[in-house]
Each structure stands twice: as structure tokens, then as C-alpha cells.
Image (cartoon, grey):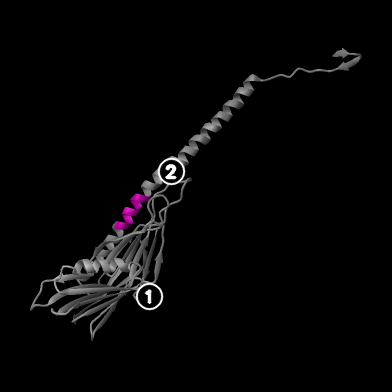
Amino acid sequence: MEAMNGVSINTKGVKYEEEGVATAVGAIFAILIFIFLLSLFITSYVPAEMTAYEEQYSSGVTNDMMQFISTVSLLTVNYQQGESASVTFDLQSNYIPLFTSPTMGELSLTSSAPGTDGYLSVSNSTVTVHSGGCLSLLTNNRYFVDESLYFELSTLLYEQRDSSPLINTTLQSSLIRVEPSTNGSINLSMSLINITGGPITLSSGSPFALSVTALSKDYYQLSGNLTLTYYSSFGFQIYKSLSESLTNINGISIGYVNEGNGYGTVDISSSATPIILNVTEMTILVGDSISS
């Protein structure tokens, strides 16, 4: 108690706990270091790992699609009505729990119909053959390149989604082939896969199987000039594949018209040499998913 000018003032000393201050500062620094390491983990490690996981997943679903095509091909070559096979698809990537969710793909099937992907008709002056259907697979990648695969018109097509400029290409095609010439004619063969059972859309976190059943196998022979009318989101790629198969034939003429809205027309003609087209149409039934 001190007196100043007759006034009493009560003063108390302020005590500092140096050990408590050091503990608090240390805790703050620990939290800051943790936040820094967590931020580094989320911004660097997580994207790198997820990119690797999605790359592996994309490679896996591509192999699944190739297996589907091989299965259809085997059912066609060794045709027995009613014979079935199954193909397993895994549409989920690996992921980092707590920080990311798995990437989930989507598998869709559309049956043959005018105005749907994979629809085709081929005709001469007297005969018309209709066929089609499309099996599509979307990866829905978020870190790796987002990709799409389409099997239609006996052709496997690839697209990088949302790419600029657009990237799409034909990975393989067995739609039309040139056969050895006989009796001075141009001999062509066409393989058509008519897919039924759609529409189906599947997206599952567990592997599943599609059942594939051979329903029928039909043969047609078309002579003379030919007209192919088809609907596909990859119209130019289909034309390009046809053109590359036929471009080295002497005397043949190929005309292409983009009708718009996915429709395209290809005219195959020859003024001097007869054209004979042998068409094999395989109709398959693709069933709903089966747990594997």
C-alpha cells in the first residue's frame, strides 16, 4: 500500500508463468506444423496417388472392354445358338480413405435403333440389312485423363472427354474387309454385331459380370453398288476406317455425306468391276449385371 498525495493506491504484481507460456507456444507451433504437413499431404501426395490409382483403373477397364470384344468374337466364330459367356467389369478405382472417395465408372448399353449410337443399315438396289447397338464405358476420372470407350459397328472407339482440341480415335475395327478377288469381282466382307438387351446403365463399387448370349447368326450377300447409312457420335471416324480399308482397291469409288445429327452416308460404287459384299450378322443378348 502506497500513499500519493494523501491517496492510497493498492498495487499487485503481475506474475508470469514462463513454463506455461513455453508450453502454449510449443503447442501452437505443433499445430502449425501439423497443418502444413496435412496441407502438403492433401495438395501433393493425394493427387499423385489418385492419379496413379485412376491410371491403373483406366487400364483395367480398357482390358475389360477388350475382353468383352474377344468374347463376342469367339461366340461368333464358334457359333452355337444359346451359348453364353460372361465378362467381368470392375468400375471402381482404389482410393485414399478419409481424403478421397473412389472413382466410379459407368457402363451403358443401347440396343439397335435408328437415332441411337451404333445403328447401321447397308443396302444395294434390292436388299437392306439393319444392325447395331453400342456398349459404352465412361471412366469419370477426376485426377487422370477422363476417358470413354465405345464398342459399336464392330469397332472400338476411344475419346478423351473434355479435351481441347477433342481427341478421339479408332483403336480397332473389323467392320469391313477386302477379300481375295474371284471372277474379276471386288469381294468384300462385313461383320455386324447386333446387340440386344438394352437399355442398361451400370455403376457399381464391386466387380460384376455381363452375360453374353449368342441368339442368331445370319448371312447376306449384296451385289452391286452399296449404300451404308449409320448413326454414330463418331461418324467421321467410322467413315475414315471404311475409307482406309477400301482406298487401295482399283476402280472403287467412295462417297461420304455428313447428314448431321450423327447420321452419315457412305456410297461404295464401281463403274467397271462388280462388287460383292458378304455380310455376317451376329445377334447377341447382353444381360443384366451378375455379382461376381
Asked whether residue 15 is drawn in magenta, I would say no
Q: Most prominent secondary structure in the magenta stretch?
A: helix
In the depicted structure, whether residue 100 falls above or below residue 125: above
Residue at mark 1 to residue at mark 2: CA–CA distance: 42 Å
* Residue at image point 52% right, 34% down: 34
On the picture, is 281 further left or further right than 145?
Answer: left
Q: Residue furthest right?
A: 6
- Residue 22 in the image: state x and y as whole percent: 60, 22
Do the CB atoms of the residues marked 1 and 2 lie less than 8 Å apart?
no
Q: In the figure, is residue 30 to the left or right of 244?
A: right
Look at the numbered disc 1 and give the secondary structure of its residue. Answer: loop
Look at the image and give the residue range highlighted in magenta.
54-62
**Which residue, as the protein is rendered here, is positioned at the far left?**
183
Relative placement, left or right, of 19 versus 37 is: right
Q: Residue at x 16, y 78 (%)?
A: 275
Residue 144, x across and y down, in percent = 38, 50
Q: Position of residue 215 (x, y in %)?
A: 27, 76
Residue 66 or 278: which is nearer the viewer? 278
Q: Secondary structure at mark 2?
A: helix
Which quadrant of the figure has residue 281? bottom left
Sequence-first disc among 1 and 2: 2
Foreground label between 1 and 2:
1
| Mark 2 neighbour density, 10 Å: few (under 14) some (14–19) many (20 or more) | some
Q: Amino acid at mark 2?
A: Val
Q: Which mark is residue 46?
A: 2
- Quarter of the image for residue 133 reads bottom left
Q: Amino acid at mark 1?
A: Gly
Residue position for label 1: 115
Residue 154 visible in rendering: no
Q: Is residue 137 visible?
A: yes
Q: Residue at x 35, y 64 (%)?
A: 136
